[in-house]
Amino acid sequence: MIERDIASPDGRMLHAYDAPPPGRVTLALLWQHGSPQTGAPLAPVLEAAARRGIRVFSYGRPSYGGSSPHLGRDVGSAAADSAAVADALGIDRFAAMGASGGGPHALAAGLLADRVMGAVTLAGIAPFSTEFDWFAGMATPAALHSARDGRAARARFEETAEFDPAQFTPADYAALEGAWASLGADVERSGAYGSDGLIDDDVAFTSPWGFALEDVRAPVLVVQGARDRVVPLAHGEWLASRLPDAEFWLRPDDGHISVLDAVPAAMDWLLACPR
C-alpha cells in the first residue's frame, strides 16, 4: 500500500492511501473511514478487494491521520476532497464506500455524478432531522447532543468523554475480536492525532450537510444492522427512503461493527453497477 500527501483545492494536505490489486483492476473504490480512525483502509476491506481486482484508495478526513484541519467543514466538502485525491492518483471513474461516520462522506462523493458510479453506506448516520426521532435508540447520544450546540460545546464534552461498552452488541465484540480486529487497532492509532477530527465529524453530522439527499444521483446501497445501538435502524430506513436511487439491505442480527461483514457482498453490488 502506498501512502502520500495530496493537496486539496484550497491548499490543505490530505494523507492518502492507494492499494492497487495484484492483477487487472476491475474497479477503483474510495473507502471513507469511520469516526475516529486514521483513514487507512482496513485489512478485511483490502483482502476482499484484492480477491475482486478492486483498487482501494482512501484518505484521512481533515484532522485525521495527518491530514490538515478544515474548521467549519460540512459533510458535502468531502466531495471536493475525494475528487482531489482521485485526480492526484490518476483515477477518473470510481465507486465510494463508507462505514459509520464514513457513510455520509461516501454519499457526498456520490454527488460527483459524472465520476462516481455507485456508493455504499454501512451503518451510516442520517442528516439531522426533526421528521423522525433522530436520537432514539442510540445507546450514547450525549456527544451528538453536545454537537447540536456547536463546536465549542462538542469540544468541551470531549474533555470528559468515556467509551460506553453498552453501545456494542455481542456480535460487535465478536467481530472486533475476530475479522475486524484491525478496526479496533486503527481506532487506537488514531488517538495519536487528537480528537479534532471526531469533534468536527460530529458537528458536521448534526449541522446542515451542504447538500440534500435528493442531490445524490449515483445509485446507493444502504446497509443497516437491525440491532445497531450507535446508528439505529431508523437512520438507515430514512436514508433509503430519501435517496433517489437506493437499495436497502437490512441485516437483522447485526450491530454497528458486525454489519461490516457485508463489505464483500457490497463490493459485488458495486461491481454490478453500470460503468
Image (cartoon, helix red, strand yellow):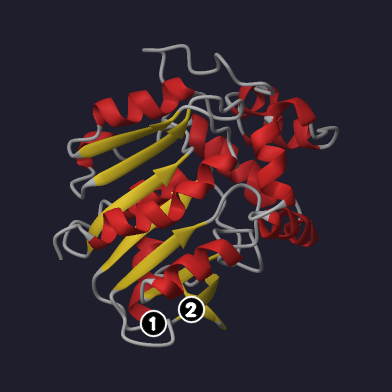
User: Residue 226, relative to residue 180: is it above or below?
Assistant: above
Label number found at residue 89: 1
- Please state if 41 lies on the left or on the right of 194 as rendered: left
Label number found at residue 2: none
Amino acid type at mark 1: Leu
Residue 117, quarter of the rendered image:
bottom left
Q: Count of labels shown?
A: 2
**Disc 1 secondary structure class:** loop
State how far apart marks 1 and 2 are (Cα). Answer: 8 Å
Residue under the image location 31 percent in, 81 percent down: 25
What is the quadrant of the C terminus in the image?
bottom left
Name the residue at the bottom extreme.
23
Residue under the image location 48 percent in, 72 percent down: 11
What is the quadrant of the N terminus in the image?
bottom right
Amino acid type at mark 2: Asp
Residue 181, quarter of the rendered image:
bottom right
Q: Is residue 56 visible?
A: no
Structural crowding at the residue carrying mark 2, measured as other residues with C-alpha within 10 Å and reported as few (<14), some (14–19) or many (≥20): many
Of labels 1 and 2, the one closer to you: 2
The reply to whether dot 1 and dot 2 touch (C-beta < 8 Å) is yes
- Of pointers 1 and 2, the one earlier in the residue sequence: 2
From the viewer's side, name the closer residue of 209 and 95.
95
Residue under the image location 46 percent in, 23 percent down: 233
Residue under the image location 21 percent in, 47 percent down: 219
| Mark 2, residue position | 18
Q: Position of residue 141 (x, y in %)?
A: 65, 22
